Image: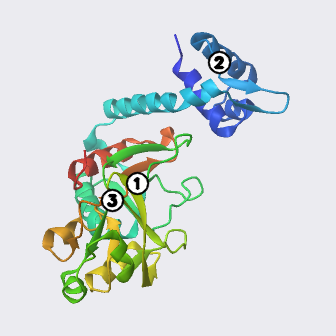
Amino acid sequence: MTRLADLELLLRTADLGSLTAAARALDWSPAAASAAVKRLEADWGVAVFVRSTRSLRLSSEGERLLPLVRQAMQVLDEARNTATAPMASLQGELQVAMPSDLGRNLLLPLLESFQQRHPQLALRAHLSDRNIDLIRIPVDAAIRYGTPRANSSQVALPLVPDNTRVLVASPAYLARHGAPATPAELIEHEAVRFMLRDEVPKTWRFFIDGEWQDVPVRGRRCANDGEVVKRWALAGAGLAYKSRLDVAVELGTGDLQQLHPEWGGEPSPLFLVVPERRQLTAAARALRDWLQERLPGSA
């Protein structure tokens, strides 16, 4: 029967690239760590690691099994946190990073109601459209768009996994310029664009007629802040291609209108991410449940 501690060692070894480093991090002796790997390989009937005198790496079987082990350990941690930490007892401090636009306009009211539910819990919000390094920057969790890499040591809990981007414009812009009738006409319109990693996008991707198409766009306004892009769109400065969550309120009020919903938008799933399973605290787990129940389109 496979031991949970052995699985923990497997994950730590894969992340650190060294059995010795993993043993040190878990306060194991090198002999105990080596024995644990041998037990795993005997239980599963495969070689999990490929060893040489100077290096250790996952075998092809180990690469295939690693995401499944991470998922299983994540489920166990969630069950343990749910069982041992009731919602009403949350205390201490929870530091959360989040995107600028989503944070200011959708998440902060939900965080306020969450804190009122847990008055002994202190919240610290870090707003930035850059994906900060969760190891170097001392935050407990990050709410971010995009599916994390399968080989990452981070734990990603889905909030709105089916979220997509949508093409929007203000009524004022549409009254002056009309809407593009075809994807090719997008190039004739003013696009207000979001710069990720300071790169100005030259195309927007849509799923049209059964295939993904990269449609050229251009415009005079670009920003590395998602809220600035939305403000430009609201002011009638141009078309924007935003996460549906970022513009959910404005679509509801009519301040922005979605164009061509038949053009499938690029996936933009939302997750709550923690650096590693040990930081999947009761507070982070409770926040995930709170947001998942209240965000538009959440599962």
Which circle's residue, 3 or 2, is located before the other in the chain?
Answer: 2
Q: Colour scheme in the image? A: rainbow
Q: Which residue is mark 1?
A: 94
What's the amino acid at mark 1?
A: Leu
Disc 2, SS? helix
Location of mark 3 (residue) = 265
Q: 13 or 207: nearer the eye?
A: 207
> Which of the two residues, 118 or 297, is positioned nearer the viewer here?
297
- Residue at image position (45%, 32%) is 71
Up/down of 5 relative to 211, above or below = above
Which mark sits nearer the N-terminus, 1 or 2?
2
Of residues 69 and 221, the one nearer the viewer is 221
Q: Identify the secondary structure beneath mark 1.
A: strand
Residue 5's mark?
none
- Dot 1, crowdedness within 10 Å: few (<14), some or many (≥20)? some
On residue 36, the disc is 2
Sequence-wise, which precedes: disc 1 or disc 3?
1
What's the residue at 32%, 49% (across, down)? 287
Report the Cα–Cα distance between label 3 and label 2: 46 Å
